[in-house]
Every structure is written in structure tokens, then in C-alpha cells.
Amino acid sequence: MAVLDIFDSYFNLTIARNITFREIVLAIVAVYTISIVVQGIRRVWFHPLSKYPGPRLAALTLWWQCYYDVFLNGGGQLLAQLKPLHEKYGPVVRIGPNHLHFSEPSAYHDIYCQGSTFHKDPNFYKLFFIDESSFGSVDRRLAKTRRDALLPFFSRRALTKLESAIQEKVDHLIDELKTYDNEPVNMHMAYRSATLDIIMEYLFARCYDAISARHFRNSTIVSLQESLSTLFVLKHFPLVFTILKILPDWLVNKLDSSAKGFIRIVHTCETHANEVLSNPEEKLHNASHEIVYHHLVTPDPAKRSEMPTKKRLSNEASSLLNAGSDTVGGTCTTGTFYVLNDERILRRLRTELDEARKERGMGVKESLGFEVLEKLPYLTAVIKESLRLAHGVVTPLPRVVGPEDSIVGGYKVPKGSVVAISSAFIHNDPVLFPDPFKFNPERWLQGPESRALERWLVPFSTGPRQCLGMNLAWSELYLFFGNVFAQLDMRVHDTTVEDMNDFKEFFLPAFSKKQLHCYVKARGD
């Protein structure tokens, strides 16, 4: 019997006499309680996913996920719970009333493969508040249309044209690092500052000049780091974003300083969108180089059906800005630590870079370009191993099964179910990657066997929703690793393997103990 029918029956039984307000309240509470109990019984014992094992509380309510995402030890703890759950329950675990998480690598390509009919889970992706971007679009066809409009901007040809802008920021970073000769440098903040400046320059032909901030503590970078935990608060309490966005900055800072970075990026992108829409011809013409709005706004009426909205422009810019400043910085931090932590790896990498310079008659202070660096096999192997251990996005990216029941990882999953697997389960799989927690570039230098591993290197995801800026990320990684290690002598300061492996899961890994610090000085010729 429906809830309204129950209430109607009670009302009809009592209408003949005077009823008190207290009785009405008690009736409503009773009906609500019964409905919750009935829903709980259905979820636990009669739901289409009830045959899959997992914590009983997770099957009952999404508050189970919320506890690990937001409250336990400051949040970001769900991923840490998944490994013991799979060890207890097997390769498929029910982690929500309608949610399954898989641990076997075979499930990854079933969920995210090219041609998949699964779509993004709207209840998860709404946390980014960029539903009109190609990343945030749940509808597959609409997402493809929006993605296709941006693909030329991230093509190899476009990167070649803008390589000098990227190289300029890398050179600036190296020059700044040389000034810290006698004190340890926070390399994570250094790389994050450089990647933010690069993506700002690439997208908008503007720059925060975060690299120049002393100790790389530019206010935007610092607040972005602090705002990582805010992301999952918004996942479970989306009303918070709506409230924060309409409040003045000074009040946001007083209420929750960790939200500053998130809100600042939103406001920056909205400001840029307003400027472009106010006078597109002038703004695009005056840009020092091609920017993202050249592909989102076409001033010529003969080439467009309608002008994109401010929300569409700001959503797309916000999506690209956040994605472009996080993953590369984390990968550079991880790779730098592991290379410096193994003298053999460092020596082999340096030898390859030095030989590349000698072949071209270059000194140690001259920068190697992307076309040279991408042909160096050991450097490429170091970057791949850095990507594997840094993971990229670690939060399991949920997809909704449909339009029919499907087979995922060998299991039949009913349509409408939400399925996911974290990239960390792929990159740490001991069958695919023996001794998975060891930094071993040589695993990528074993001919056909290594080429087969490419299928399982998924820091940028795969399939139709693969990271749009993957080519840009690879370009940055080559230029950072190739020039930082060639031009600088670095030594790890007070940072351990445990520090690097201990991270919280806030979509991307967030180091929860110490960030990488190094002593840095210029190499001699």
C-alpha cells in the first residue's frame, strides 16, 4: 500500500471525530517510519542487487558512503575501505543501495570501453556543478558534440603551435627552483604552481604567475589544495555550493576557508565568460594566441546557430582548468620522489638526457623540446611508471548500466545499476604489474609484453569519455621530467615512501601526511 493510501485510510477513520494536532503528527511520523522500514527491507533483501555481497549498511543507505567520504578522519577514506571489502567479499561488492564496485581488471573495459552504452551517473557528476561542460554532460550524444568542438584545441597540431608557451613556464619553474639553494622546496606545490600557470596560459592567454610566489604559496594554489575536501562535502550536500556561491568572498572565508579555491575558480571562469560574450570579436582578436574560446565561440553568424550561454562557457572553462592543473602536478611529484629515491634509476635517466643534449651540441642550461624528449625510451618509461603509481583519478567513476542488462567482469548486472572500478585497482594489480608498489620503469621496456601493458595504464580513463587534455598532459610531463632532471640536482628532504603512499581520495589523490620536499641546486656543465 502506498504511503498516501495509508495516510488517507487513517484520515478517513478519524474524520468523524475531532483529532488533535498531536495525533496528526504521530500519524505522519508513523507512516514515515513504516515507509523507511519497508524501503530498507526491500533494499537489503528484495532489491535486484541483493544477491551481491557487501556491508548491510551500505545496501541500506548512501549515508554509509557519506561517512567515509566526509566524516571519517576528515573524509576521503572510501577507497581505503574498498580493498579490505573485496578481500572479504570477493571481486564484486555492493557499496550502495544501487551501487557495485569491481576489483578484477577485466571489469574496467566492460564499464568504460569505447562504444559502451553506459552513461555517467548524474547523482555523482552533479557534484562538480559543470553539467553543461563536455565532462559534466551525462547524455552521451551531447557530451560527444561538446567534446568534438574542443578536440582541435588539444590536438597534436595545436600543441605544437603552443609548445613555446608551455616551455616558457617550465623554464620559469626551473629558474625559480635554482633560487632555493640552501632550503628545502615543497616540490608538490612547485609543480602545482607551474601546471596552474600553464593551463591558464593555454586556455585563456592569462596567468596567475603562481610560480613566482615565494615558497610557491600563491593564494589560489593554497586555497585549491585546501578545498579538495570540499568536493565530497558537495557530493553529499549539494545545497552547500548554492549557498557558498551567492555569499560574498569575505563571508565564505569566515565560514569555510577551504572553499575559497573552489569558489575562486568558478568566479574566474564566469568573469572570463562574461568578457568574451560582451564583445567576442575584440576579445578573441586581442588574445596573444589561440585560446579555448576560439573553439567555443564563433562570432561569424554564418558559422553558428546560436551563441553559447555564459553557463556553458564558464562550465567548460572550469572543467578544463581544474583537470589541467591537478593530474600532471601529482604525477610529477610522484615520479620525482621515486626517481630520486633510486640512484640507479636517476643515473640511467640522466645519462639518456645528457646523451640527447650532446648529440645536439646543447649545454646543460638549454632546454630540450618535446619532439626530442618523446623519442627517449627510458624517459618515456619513467613517465609511464609515474602515471601508474600516481593513478590520476582514483575515485571510482560511476556508470549507469543500460539500456539493457549487461555483463560486467563476468557478472550479470541489471540495467539501471551503478557500476564502477577505481584505477588504483588496475595499477596495483599484482598479476598485471608484478611487485606493483615498486617503481620499476623497466617494466615498460620489454617489447611486446610492455606494449600489452598499455591497455592497463588508465590514468586518463579510456573509451568515449577519456580525458580530453591527455595530449597536453603528456607534453607537460615530457617537458617537466626531461628538463628538471637534466638541469637540476635534487635531494629528497624528510619525505618517505609511506608519505607518498598515504593519500586521501578526493577524486584525485591528496597527500595526507607530508608533501614532497627537496633540496635543489643547478647542475654544473
Image (spheres, helix red, strand yellow):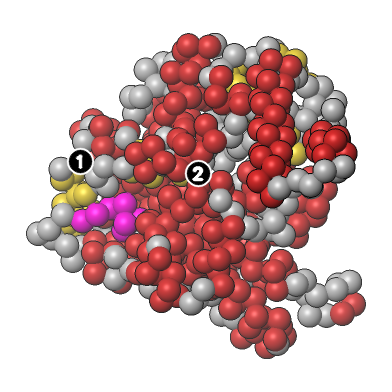
Q: In the depicted view, which residue is nearer to us: 403 or 89?
A: 89
Residue at x 32%, y 33% (from the top left corner):
501
Q: Nearer the viewer, mark 1 or mark 2?
A: 2
- Looking at the image, how many numbered discs can be counted on the residues? 2
Comparing 151 with 145, the one in front is: 145
**Magenta stretch bounds:** 185-193
Residue at figure coordinates x 83%, y 48% from the top left: 141
Could you give the CA–CA distance between mark 1 and mark 2, rounded to whole angstroms?
A: 23 Å
Frontmost residue, 15 versus 141: 15
- Give percent across and percent down for residue 388: 45, 33
Q: Residue 507 carries which label?
A: 2
CB atoms of marks 1 and 2 within 8 Å: no
- Helix, strand, or loop for circle 2? loop
Q: Is residue 468 left or right of residue 378?
A: right
Residue type at mark 1: give it: Thr
Q: Residue at x 26, y 42 (%)?
A: 513
Which amino acid type is shown beneath numbered disc 2? Phe
Regarding residue 392, the answer to whether it shows in the image is: no
Asked whether, in this view, residue 343 is left or right of residue 284, the answer is left
Q: Where's residue 490, x and y in %? A: 20, 48
Q: Which residue is situated farthest in the left direction here?
A: 182
For the residue pair 491 and 348, the one nearer the viewer reads as 491
